[in-house]
Amino acid sequence: MHKYLPLIILIFLLGKNAFAQPQPSPQERSVQLSATTQTNPPQINLQWKPDFGATKYVVYRKALNDTNWGNPIATLAGSATSYVDNNVQVGVGYEYAFFKEDFAYRRDTICVPSGTPLTFTINDVNGIGVCCSFGDGFYEIKNCNNIVASGAQFGYSETKNFTACNDGSGCSEIYITVKPSMIDNSTSWTLQNNQTGQIIASAGGAGQFIRPRPEYGFIYAGIELPPVEDHGRILLVVENDLVTPLATEIDELKMDFIKDGWRVSTINVDRNDAISSVLNAIKNVYNSQADLNAVLLLGHVPIAFSGSIFPDTHTENEGAYPADVYYGEMDGVWTDNTVNVTSAFLSIYHNVPGDGKFDQDTPSSGVVELQVGRVDFFDMPAFGQTEVQLVQQYLNKNHQFKTRQINPTRRALIDDNIGQTIAAPAASGYRNFATMFGANNIFESDYFGTMGSQSYLWSYGAGSGDVSTAAGVGTTNDFANSNLQNVFTMLFGSQFGNWAFGNNLLRAPLASGQTLTSCYSGNPPWVLHHMSMGYPIGYSLLQTQNNTNDLYLPYGPALVSTALMGDPTLRMHMVEAPTNLQITNNNNTINLNWNPPSNETLVGYNIYRAASVNGVFQKINNNTITSTSFVDNSPLTGDNFYLVKTLKLETSGSGTYYNLSLGLLGNTNFTGTGGDTTPPTITIATANNNVNTNFTVNIFPSENINGLTISDFDISNGTASNLTGGATFYSMTITPSAAGLVTIVLPSQTVTDLAGNENTAASNTLSVTYTPPNNGDTTPPTITIATGNNNVNTNFTVNIFPSENINGLTISDFDISNGTATNLTGGATFYSMTITPSAAGLVTIVLPSQTVNDLAGNENTAASNTLNVTYTPNTSNCNNPINTALNKTSTQHSTQFGATASRATDGNTDGDFWNGNSVALTNWTNQSWWEVDLGGVVDITEIRIFNRSDCCQDILKNYYVFVSENPFNSTDLNSTLNQNGVVNFLQNNAAGTPTTIPANTTGRYVRVQLSGQGFLALA
């Protein structure tokens, strides 16, 4: 939150130049993360390509399924290029976020006299507000806890009038929040006294960003993560025209799904069916099959249209777009009664009430349940083949890739012809590709000129164009006449994001070469980093579409147009399978023998078994098999279907994980005498029944079991985590809740053996006595709290200094009078938090006794000191501005006639150089400068520039004022203009006494600099 105070600098200077606020490039908008790992001790080493304009990296870590990033784990200097995480375990995945600039909203607090009549005006130079084609932005104004104005889709401008309430302080606080869209340099606002016309505060404006543009990267990293053995179920929706001519290829596709750990359901539809009929058929499967995760639309399955959007920035294309997300949302409410837009040149975009096209711009429920991919070659005459032939060609190469007959080179190509426009769309390439291959394996090259003869697993191409063209990248005809060696691609540009056009560029890659998936990435950026560790592209589609809590994207949930062309089950890393499975059925056992893959570096093999070919395959080997044979000693009575899979330790740009090939399938019917009716028994044990820390519990089933989860155990005085293992050995970690007895038991009827027999008896009850460690330490910790200033006029930071490492400190532990605490960060022997005073007067903070423990379990037996801080509300925006530059340390390029830099901040605004020593003066030089250090980051409402009063007023013009939270990297003007985080103001007109520059920013360092030669004099 910004609470602005005036900064007054008294200035005389010469110079000229033009105003500019540089935009970060696609690479600068990214943090190009990759990871290397080691196992002993476990360590994840994260690296990234250096960005010489970065001022910081704020690092977060979370578990894969967490829906927020929590608190940062580190803040690194902008010069950093690596970070080592030692707090990791082998077999556990960790997701990291690195922010150079985060997703924060713009928040401002402005203080005005109660009863002031106010006008708030928000503008967008493109006439599209802050919602919804480029993110779900909004604005909101609160005063006295009431929302007095809000909006989002306001076109070019919106004005709201209101009167500042009386909140009892004499200076009524106005809270302004803006969540910008992707085009965050097009939005600006002003708050004005509508009686006097005075602009009280403002933000944004021509060439300025209303907030720093997000610059970030994500990575999902780990050490030897376990293989994904079961992906759930996929529904194959086949258009009727393909059923008969492609029966062989469709059967092969289904078998490839099954061999990769999917179960398959199939429905056939007609291209003329109502979309509601198709959706209901999908819902029927979803409601009857709880494991349904994905849908592949094969052929010209009816297309749903929705929204009033224009993702490519062309308002002439505003309207309804294809929305395959409709088929992935199982509880959405799709309406057709509000949108009425017919301004687009082409009728395909028109959307009016009752026309069968929906109103929603984003998924209606906010949560898309199913991964939906489409392989559809309707109306693609450029390729000179029928739809059936093109689908057949796609299915054949899909099989070839999954069986590693196509084995592309692991690297990425980027052909970017757009640059910084619309949030620098090619950042999707740099950001994701680094996690896959490392930044050094991303190559900037010509799309068709390179991949026609060279292999790249991934590519990205962006360029302006039309439905069949991306300028600088290529056309649909180029795809028709090429045979690209590329499997996964992302494209971005004008118009072709609407893939329902004939000869559409987004569908074209799938119709030729080796390409199997294509997506429109830039609005929104796609979230693909999980694929680096074995996840299918359909998982990435869901993360992009849902974006819970703005987790991965700063702009909210994805547009309805976000879609995947291709098979959603595709993974990046395919492993060669074994061959020639031989199955021998004996009286009591089944013997399996096979041949190894011919060209694979493997760890071994896993064996999976099911009672039917489309059933749930379960691993039946206890340990990884390193030979090429296996004996099943407990076969099922009746049919036994087996999958033998190669197990490989895969290394990617994000770490290591165990990867499986498609299974080698075989089956037999067992009628021997070995039918198993014996229930399994479970024994649980630990190495030590008296502990002073977390401990490991081992679980020993008497035979292979299925279905064991943490929730199956009954645990008293503790919690379980990290259940690992399988078959006849599992382990988990127990964290005791308090001193005393911890008990663990597995109840009866919770697991089954491979023959389906339940455990009829509970396990033994394991009892462990937990005594918190003291290591001989009986000394209670003491706590000291302090702040940098005991007289404040705004929020302030309180630092907490424990005498030793402590556990359990929370904000609620503190007793605070006349204030509230937020943002408690830190750990061990240092914490800090922010205090927001409630009213003028004394604010007190104390940590009572018996609230925290040291690592030996000793409580703080005494309260901390009581910290007293006097809060005097700042009324700077009301009647009494504060000069935050007064008497602060200042420097300048050079000094003439003894006119030192400090004269510009001494409070003397006389401006007569020869009378009163009130003017600082440099020598005549090029790009001369003067600078002040405010001593800390402060909120700045305005900067006041005072001209000389004795002469020469006409030459005080064309000068820059720079503001930064961090030191300036250089005295060179152009370098400062391009420094990340620096705000600049160009004043072309002659200054007055004073000239007031509305700043409404934060900063510590303020510089004034000439662009040409001259004296620099500041009054």
Image: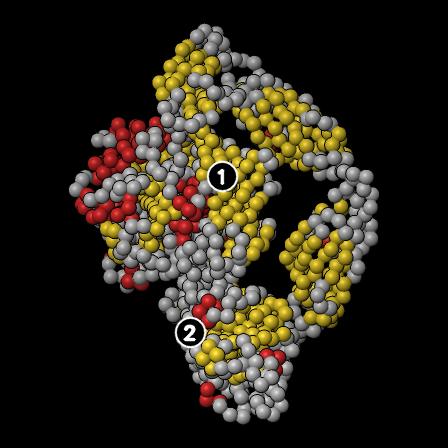
Specify the quadrant of the image occupied by residue 731.
top right
Question: Is residue 440 depicted above or below 735 in this figure?
Answer: below
Image coordinates of residue 290 in percent, x first then y, are 45, 34
Residue 119 as seen in the image, left or right of residue 815: left
Dot 1 corresponds to which residue? 655
Query: In the image, what residue occupies the spot 27% across and 32% down?
Result: 396
Question: Is residue 695 depicted above or below 443 in this figure?
Answer: above
SS state under label 1: strand
Image coordinates of residue 943 in percent, x first then y, are 54, 78
Query: In the image, what residue occupies the spot 29% across and 44% down?
Result: 451
Question: Is residue 62 depicted above or below 15 in this figure?
Answer: above
For residue 19, the mark is 2
Image coordinates of residue 1 in percent, x first then y, are 58, 65
Front-most of 549 and 779? 779
The amino acid pointed to by label 2 is Phe
Residue 360 as seen in the image, left or right of residue 795: left
Quick one: label 2, few (<14), some, or many (20+) residues within 10 Å?
A: some
